[in-house]
Image (cartoon, helix red, strand yellow):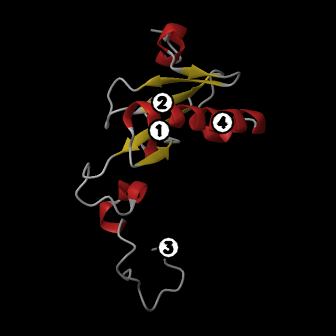
Amino acid sequence: MTEESPFLDIPSSEWIASNRSAFAIFDSFPVAKGHCLIISRRFIRDWWETLPSEQADIFALVSEVKELLDKQYSPAGYNIGTNAGSAAGQTIFHLHLHLIPRYIGDSEHPQGGVRNVFPEKASYLRPPLRPIDNANAPF
């Protein structure tokens, strides 16, 4: 394994799509059928280090891979996300986006989607509990 990033060792024969700035693979530990990673070709830590041209290319590749997944798996929706920094759960410090197909019935309560990283704060369908006497409280 390459010391900096295990993604640098992935042979192009395992890529399902690519462009000048990124490549896509099926996730080795999928949370759903068709879960893919879109990985920057340039070894950078996270989204905040990308150039504008890389951002455009990465999202173009997300769209291309979504079309492939639509044809192969016919999901009902998608989650797209990235973890930036240890506090956000990043474990491989090489920029990658998760493209996760979603299916009817794959979660008992899918409302909130990525907001479920904090399950107690995920529901925006109920009024939030806010302190009355502290207007500067973040939540």
Which residue type carries mark 1?
A: Leu
Residue 99 pos. (x, y %)? 47, 38
| Callout 1–callout 2 Cβ contact below 8 Å | yes
Identity of the residue drawn at 39% across and 40% down: 74
| Callout 4–callout 1 Cβ contact below 8 Å | no
Does the image show residue 138?
A: yes
Say few, some or many: other residues with alpha carbon within 10 Å of mark 3 (under 14 / 14 to 19 / 20 or more).
few
Disc 2 versus disc 4: nearer the observer: 4
Q: Which residue is mark 3?
A: 138
Q: Which residue is mark 4?
A: 60
Identity of the residue drawn at 49% across and 78% down: 137
* Between discs 2 and 4, the one toward the N terminus: 2
Q: Which residue is mark 1?
A: 99
Q: Which mark is residue 75?
A: none
Q: Mark 3 and mark 4: span between their CA atoms?
A: 34 Å
| Callout 1–callout 3 Cβ contact below 8 Å | no
* Between discs 1 and 2, the one toward the N terminus: 2
